[in-house]
Image (spheres, rainbow, N blue to C red):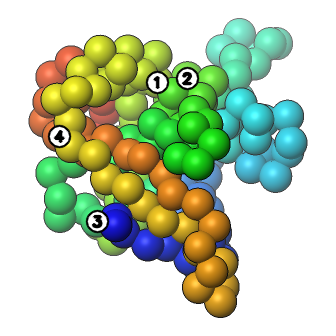
């Protein structure tokens, strides 16, 4: 048995970190939250950051947010299977974002991870990383499903993948 999360609590607790990230990004970008948009949700994209470089046509950077309250561990927790019963692909591989915004809200530290590089690195090295199963339950504690995650050492990922770290 792995860790356990209550869906209602996780969903509610993710709103504040998203607001923090959006506020920080607004220094440079027009930010659009697309978490509730079905089309973007299917692509595992949470935010669009728009920036006009030439004053005419904005560039669009797609961002996927991952919030991790366990900043004291040396790992990134990378979901590779979102539902083990259905064997459905996890967000880490599913996202069509340009960057994964991996955020530690307790210390307000944001890791901006190049998605394509991170996907390739984790996939090529999956067998090296420890598994972490996480159970998701409903408000009344009823079991819904489990996810399979890989615990990827942050220092290792940062050696092989473009990761920028910011205090926000």
- As helix, strand or loop, the secondary structure at mark 4 comes to strand
Q: Is residue 97 above or below residue 44?
A: above
Q: Indicate left or right for 116 with 35 as reference.
A: left
> Upstream in the sequence, badge 3 or badge 2?
3
- As helix, strand or loop, the secondary structure at mark 3 comes to loop
> Upstream in the sequence, badge 4 or badge 2?
2
Residue found 43% across the figure and 72% down from its top: 4
CB under 8 Å between discs 2 and 1: yes
Residue in front for this viewpoint, 128 or 15 = 128
> Upstream in the sequence, badge 3 or badge 4?
3
Q: What label sits on residue 70 in the rendered view?
A: 3
- Judging by the rendered image, the residue that carries numbered circle 1 is 115
List x then y, in percent, for residue 58. Answer: 75, 19
- Judging by the rendered image, the residue that carries numbered circle 2 is 98
- C-alpha separation, residue under disc 4 versus residue under disc 2: 21 Å
Residue in front for this viewpoint, 32 or 141 = 141
Q: Nearer the viewer, mark 4 or mark 2?
A: 4
Task: Please state, as top left, top right, bottom left or bottom right, where the N terminus lies in the image.
Answer: bottom left
CB under 8 Å between discs 4 and 2: no
Res 112 quadrant in image? top left
- C-alpha separation, residue under disc 4 versus residue under disc 1: 16 Å
- As helix, strand or loop, the secondary structure at mark 1 comes to helix
List x then y, in percent, for residue 104. Answer: 35, 59
Q: Is residue 8 visible?
A: yes
Q: What label sits on residue 153 in the rendered view?
A: 4
- C-alpha separation, residue under disc 2 versus residue under disc 1: 5 Å
Q: Indicate left or right for 83 with 80 as reference.
A: right
Q: Nearer the viewer, mark 4 or mark 1?
A: 4
């Amino acid at each position: 048995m792995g860790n356990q999360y209550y869906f209602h609590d996780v969903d509610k607790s993710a709103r504040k970190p998203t607001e923090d990230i959006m506020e920080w990004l607004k220094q440079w970008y027009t930010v659009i939250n697309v978490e509730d948009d079905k089309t973007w949700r299917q692509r595992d994209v949470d935010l669009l950051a728009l920036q006009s470089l030439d004053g005419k046509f904005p560039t669009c950077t797609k961002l996927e947010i991952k919030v991790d309250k366990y900043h004291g561990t040396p790992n990134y927790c990378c979901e590779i299977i979102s539902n083990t019963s259905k064997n459905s692909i996890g967000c880490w591989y599913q996202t069509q974002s340009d960057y994964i915004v991996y955020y530690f809200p307790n210390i307000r530290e944001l890791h901006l991870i190049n998605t394509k590089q991170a996907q390739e690195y984790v996939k090529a090295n999956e067998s090296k990383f420890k598994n972490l199963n996480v159970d998701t339950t409903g408000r009344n504690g009823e079991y819904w499903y489990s996810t399979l995650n890989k615990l990827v050492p942050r220092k290792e990922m940062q050696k092989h993948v473009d990761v920028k770290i910011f205090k926000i």
